[in-house]
Image (cartoon, helix red, strand yellow):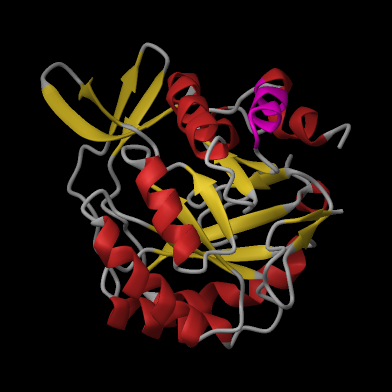
Amino acid sequence: MIELAPRHKIGLPVDSPILLAAGSVGFGEAIHPSIDTTRLGGVVVGPITRHSIRGSDGPRLAETSSGFVLQTGLQNRGVSAVIKNFARLWPRLGCPVIAQIADDSPEEAVSTARRLAEIIGLSGLELRLSAQTEPGELRPLLRAIRRNTDLPVWVKLPLNGAETFAQASAAAGADGLVIASPPIGAGLAGQSTLVRGDLFGPAAFAPMLAGLSVVAALGLELPLIACGGIHTPQQVRQALAAGASAVQLDSVVWVEPDAVEKLTSGW
């Protein structure tokens, strides 16, 4: 058993250090048949915001030599529609389910958190910080969520400035830290259309590991969850050795879902 919210009154215990990251399986409806979620430590669903977001105009995807760039614009149906259409799926996954909140303002984030906290069986929340979030904005945002829900709250840090945001998150009462949101990349879709967005794939692993090592060196006594470009068992072991208590899988779930079984075995 691994405790991923040791400071929280109810905690967030998981049976495996292997989790699925937000976006990898949508809201729980987009799970590949080869993935046995009962063998996972947990699944993060989302992103979820108070109001629906249409998302970015196309093209959204561009391949690179070692992965791909994706710009979704946080497309989602809004918390009310997510709860209505997908919350019933979460107990069937057979593992802890954590919902990712992607609102920037404290008012909207609190509203989303309150709605999600009503879902029986939800194990925790993950607050996704945008690239525009300032360190000074984090404390009121996180504390507002903490005051309005009894669920554990992880903070998913931006890779740029992870050290600063990690310290601010710990001071504001985060129960765990996810390292990190993807780095920004760019690639061509077709012959000439430039897509700028989140970089996924093996290329994202090295910068994630560097950020993880910096945050681990702070000694914040919070569980760290590594997320970014993990595709092999060796990378899982490297992330754990660098200070992570668990890992989240993202791009491998999309491009090689059969590999998830190999990554979950032996834990």
The residue drawn where x is 70% and y is 27% is: 241
Residue drawn where x is 47% and y is 30% of the image: 208
Determine whether 251 is above or below 235 in the image.
Answer: below
**Most common secondary structure along the magenta stretch:** helix
Vertical side of 130 occupied by 197: above or below: above
Q: Is residue 215 visible?
A: yes
Q: Position of residue 221 (x, y in %)?
A: 64, 52
Q: Quadrant of residue 53?
A: bottom left
Residue at point 66%, 64% (across, down): 97
- What residue range appears in magenta? 235-243
Determine if the magenta segment contains residue 139: no
In the image, taking residue 10 as reference, residue 27 lies left or right, namely: left
Work out whether 132 lies above or below 17: below
**73 displayed left or right of 109:** left
| Residue 67 at x, y percent in the picture | 42, 21
Q: Is residue 236 magenta?
A: yes
Viewer-closest of 48 and 188: 48
- In the image, 127 versus 186, the foreground residue is 127
Which x, y percent locates residue 129?
Answer: 35, 56
